[in-house]
Image: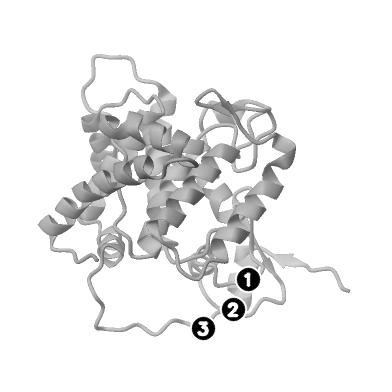
Amino acid sequence: MSKITYLSVKETAKRWHMSERSVRNYCLQGRIVGALFEGKTWNIPSNAEKPHRKIRHTAKQDTLLSFLKREKETGLKGGIYHKIQIDLTYNSNHIEGSKLTHDQTRFIFETKTLGVTNKVVKVDDIIETVNHFHCIDVIIEGAHTKLSESSIKQLHYILKSGTTDGQKPWFKVGDYKMLKNEVGGEATTKPADVAAEMKSLLMEYNAKSEITLDDILDFHVRFEAIHPFQGGNGRIGRLILFKECLKHTIVPFIITEELKLYYYRGIKNWKNERGFLRDTCLTAQDVMKQWLDYFGIVYS
């Protein structure tokens, strides 16, 4: 059997007579068979076929995802995309110890500045906030793609790029952990076993013919139990939650500071009592539904 050779995005774009951006989008959407995301670049099989352009339909239902994509492209301020970027980033970072306020998070998103502050601010908090905005854009653009190891590693690479963690020799940005870690005082999967357990988890999840909210929550709990990365697992896990809800037309939700302890309790007790986590997420979902009602966005 001949060895597979790979081309860069630039080489593929030249071969297919299209822009490099279009090639990257095809990779992100999972439309190029065998494309691999390694480090910060895409490697594309030299024998890969150019994807056919999708036919654009003029009569689209204005779902949350269509709103997010449109507002992202137009740069609209004050819409649902604007609100989700700020609230999801602020709350998910805050759960993990970020000291940035909601207003500071909003200033960074809107003006690329921190605003007036009389307190010391960690550079990492700012960098990870900007990176988290980018992660949200990635899950919006790739909402309909199948979850994969490469797409999950890509989110981690984006989130942790440029941070002090990334300067540590034992912290692998965009790749699985090298050292043992724990979550909530509980042991997690050993580094040597992470790749196999992630493959097994993804294979089982992607094999389901229909995905429910419970399926997404179960994936989240098992992902956090594996704790595949040295750090950033909570934020990556919640980004995946949001993405999968968008993909399967389930109203997504944001875990706030007020719900944090209930959220942790739900994860810890999931195996024996699913109602704790489910009810917490449904409570968060009710808040999102109020936003959707306000912006006139349909949901089921």
- Residue positioned 58% across, 48% down in the render: 153
**First reached walking from the N terminus: tag 3 or tag 1:** 1
Q: CA distance from mark 3 to mark 1?
A: 15 Å
275 lies above or below 21: above
Q: Give the SS element for disc 1.
A: helix
Q: CA distance from mark 2 to mark 3?
A: 11 Å
The residue type indicated by label 3 comes to His
Q: Give the SS element for disc 3.
A: loop
- Residue positioned 63% across, 49% down in the render: 198
Cβ atoms under marks 2 and 1 closer than 8 Å? yes
Displayed quadrant of residue 212? bottom left
- Report the quarter where the N terminus lies: bottom right
Residue assigned mark 2: 16
Q: CA distance from mark 2 to mark 1?
A: 6 Å
Report whether 56 appears left or right of 41. Answer: left
Local crowd size for mark 2, using a 10 Å CA cut-off: few (<14), some (14–19), many (≥20): few
Cβ atoms under marks 3 and 1 closer than 8 Å? no
Cβ atoms under marks 2 and 3 closer than 8 Å? no
Residue assigned mark 3: 52
Determine if residue 254 is in view.
Answer: no
**First reached walking from the N terminus: tag 2 or tag 3:** 2
The residue type indicated by label 2 comes to Trp
Q: Residue furthest front?
A: 272
Q: Give the SS element for disc 2.
A: helix
- Report the quarter where the C terminus lies: bottom left
Between 167 and 174, the one lying in front of the other is 174
Between 113 and 178, the one lying in front of the other is 178
Residue assigned mark 1: 12
Local crowd size for mark 3, using a 10 Å CA cut-off: few (<14), some (14–19), many (≥20): few
Local crowd size for mark 1, using a 10 Å CA cut-off: few (<14), some (14–19), many (≥20): many
